[in-house]
Image (cartoon, grey):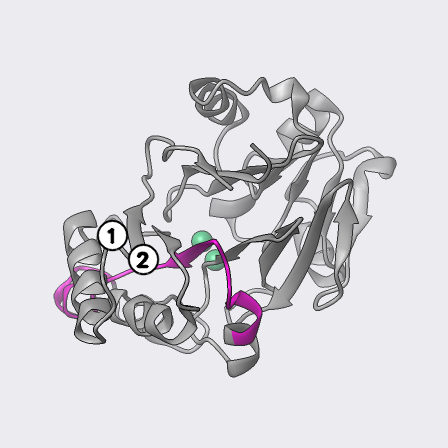
Amino acid sequence: MSLQFCSLSSGSSGNCQYISTDNVKILVDSGLSGKKVENFLKEIEVQANTIDGILVTHEHKDHIKGVGILSRRYDLPIYANTNTWKAMEGELGKINEKNIIEFKTDEGFELKDLAILPFRISHDSSEPVGFAFYHKNKKISYLTDTGYVSDDVKKKIRNSNLLVVESNHDVEMLKIGKYPWFLKKRVLGSEGHLSNEDAGKLITEVLSGREQDILLAHLSKENNFPELAYQTVVNIVSEKGIKINEEVNINLTYRDKPTRVFNY
Ligand SMILES: [Zn+2]
Ligand SMILES: [Zn+2]
């Protein structure tokens, strides 16, 4: 047991991920109420008062709703880059000065024995990031809320034991769905969200050949179905001759319950 990951909740109604080593326990975003996060943690047998800090990807509500509450309740440091801190001003409530910690995008840092690389992504917020986590020779990458994936980001998420990747919408469902036009344009744009097809293609491009786990994340409630996301990605990956359940395991995240705990 060394590097662990659990998606406590993922989707436009709230995002919160848990990552830990034997020495440090971190949340990535907290877009749910403090109570919900506590309950989801309990489901995986983690006490909320043992969490060491919260990393923030970007300032959208579905990622920061519970950040201030948890920081105050458990005296947790919050880690975000400069522009995300600026954008969060007034959104988190009063945060203890010592718990305001800035990191620099594209510069690695360490929390105990967990090495963290925040990398720039393409989304309509001030300075959005994904994260690559390293512990010993294991790696987990987290990439959601991006409309476009650059070659540089592809490089950064390669060779992950676990890749958590956005599979937000089915393009046809979105197009014929009830979202207003401006919102459809936003989601489909290069600063929006990755579609199921985008996720499938990206996975084929970054697979390293060794057995890997994939978690499909940030599924839209309106413009996707879990089965559709899963099947679309499986089809695209299989078409490339990659063997599902042998070379790659594809799993779903949920809006209303944690995934299993992935252990590396
Ligand atoms: Zn989001
Ligand atoms: Zn967002």
Look at the picture and state if 157 lies above or below 248: below
What amino acid is at disc 2?
Val
- Left or right: 50 as drawn, with respect to 165: right
- Pointer 2 residue: 248
Look at the picture and state if 215 lies above or below 18: below
Look at the picture and state if 113 lies above or below 172: above
- Pointer 1 residue: 245
- Crowd around label 1: few <14 · some 14–19 · many ≥20 (10 Å): few
Q: Which residues are magenta?
A: 155-179
What amino acid is at disc 1?
Asn
Any part of residue 223 in sight: no
Q: Assign a secondary structure to mark 1.
A: loop
Look at the picture and state if 21 lies above or below 180: above
In this view, the residue in front, 147 or 196, is 196
**Whole-percent x, y for residue 49 in the image:** 66, 19
- Crowd around label 2: few <14 · some 14–19 · many ≥20 (10 Å): many
Seen at 52% across and 46% down, the residue is 63
**Whole-percent x, y for residue 231 in the image:** 15, 58
Q: Assign a secondary structure to mark 2.
A: strand
For the residues marked 2 and 1, what is the alpha-carbon distance in whole angstroms? Answer: 5 Å
